[in-house]
Amino acid sequence: MFPPWKDGRIFNSYDSLPGQDEHEGGCQKEDLDRTSRRDQVRLGILWLVAGVAALVSLMLTLRAYLLPSLYGVCQNPAVRQEWRTLSSDQQLHYIDAVSCLMRQPSAVDPRTSLYDDFIYTHLKAGSYSHYAAAFLAWHRLFIHHYEQTLKSACGFKGQLPYWDWTLDWDDLSSSPVWDVVYGFGGDGSAEGEVVLQNGRCVTDGPFANSIRAYKAIRGEGDHVAHEVSFDPHCLSRGFKNDSLLDTLQSLVSPSSVQEVLAQSNYEAFFEAFETGAHNAIPQFISGDFLSFGAPNDPVFWLHHTQVDRLWWLWQQQEPDTRLKQFGGPTRDFRYTDGGNGSSLQDNLPMAGLFGEQSVAEVMNAENGILCYRY
């Protein structure tokens, strides 16, 4: 099929009509020639715009299906390790870097710290991803920015560690992550007042009596307010010790996690994961962790690195398909009809504080953007 400017009508010669003199015929011919040229230009522009739109669409589609090659595979991906496999010096180095971040000035509010900027981001932008398709991708990018900020702002030389809670599932409160020297301190003080979500001030360990700037307040039922509220308070925890404890611990057992990893498609995987093992840890720890201000607790980062690790393991089972398998609701599926419109081209917002990427750009942890593995 030929473009419109090559059909017979536009290239007709428009000879002088019978009875016209040469001058009149020449003027009409000249006018018609000008009209013809204008039509050609207009149609050419329309075809150009349509061509550009088609090219952009094609590029976005190709980007989604050429993930490993498009973003490159880094030559030496960093290897993230489980907390208890680190040496004592490595553990202290990481803890010192986190403490350092809590002393660096904020880009948002001079009353807060650079560490608090991550809580701000989670409250402002991250809440949209919970119970939605972007949950795993958003947090993968979020913890990547945290890791890079530890390095650039505080000289951290290692990689984000993870807490493999399947190793502690039968007694989460005895995990080495709660060590007061080589960990993050333990439960909130039993004598203190409740600060948030049955949590009381943490009074031991490297973050004892740590003051955090933002607090998320839960509304009625399971709804959580997403507004950012400046509300300084102590870091709080309240380890679960009631009849729900056994249920929560069973959700992070090796057998339960294996059932999640056995899910055959992305949507089934992320929904089973988020509502199961992922949620069990905040419900066990309570306090700040049981809110959208969860990053107030430094253990949040070890927990979500473990979450990312399990997504990575699920992807590695069938990398040819799962490195580009994504979909599901665009919004919280508990309270809305989130639809099924999520795509690899969706943007991952970071509240204007950190670099944003598309979902496609973080699907492969070993690409040139992220460059790590487990």
Image (spheres, rainbow, N blue to C red):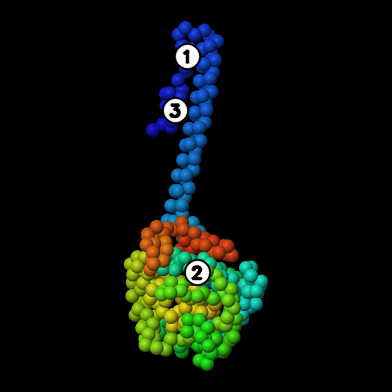
Which quarter of the figure has residue 311?
bottom left
Q: What residue sits 41% from the left and 79% below the top?
A: 280
Residue 118 visible at all:
no
Query: Residue 128 at what x, y percent from top left?
Result: 47, 65
- Name the element at disc 1: loop
The residue that label 1 is drawn on is 15
Mark 2, secondary structure of its residue: loop
Is residue 191 visible in this depiction of the protein? Answer: yes
| Label total for image | 3
Say which mark, if any, is on residue 226: 2
Q: Residues within 10 Å of mark 2 (few under 14, many from 20)?
A: many
> Which of label 2 and label 1 is nearer to you?
2
Image quadrant occupied by the N terminus: top left
Residue at image point 36% right, 72% down: 272
Q: Which residue is mark 3?
A: 6
Q: Earlier in the sequence, mark 3 or mark 1?
A: 3
Measure how far apart labels 2 and 1 are at the Cα level: 73 Å
Amino acid carrying mark 3 in the image: Lys
Q: Which residue does the image show at 42% across and 89% down from the upper left?
A: 241
Amino acid of disc 1: Asp
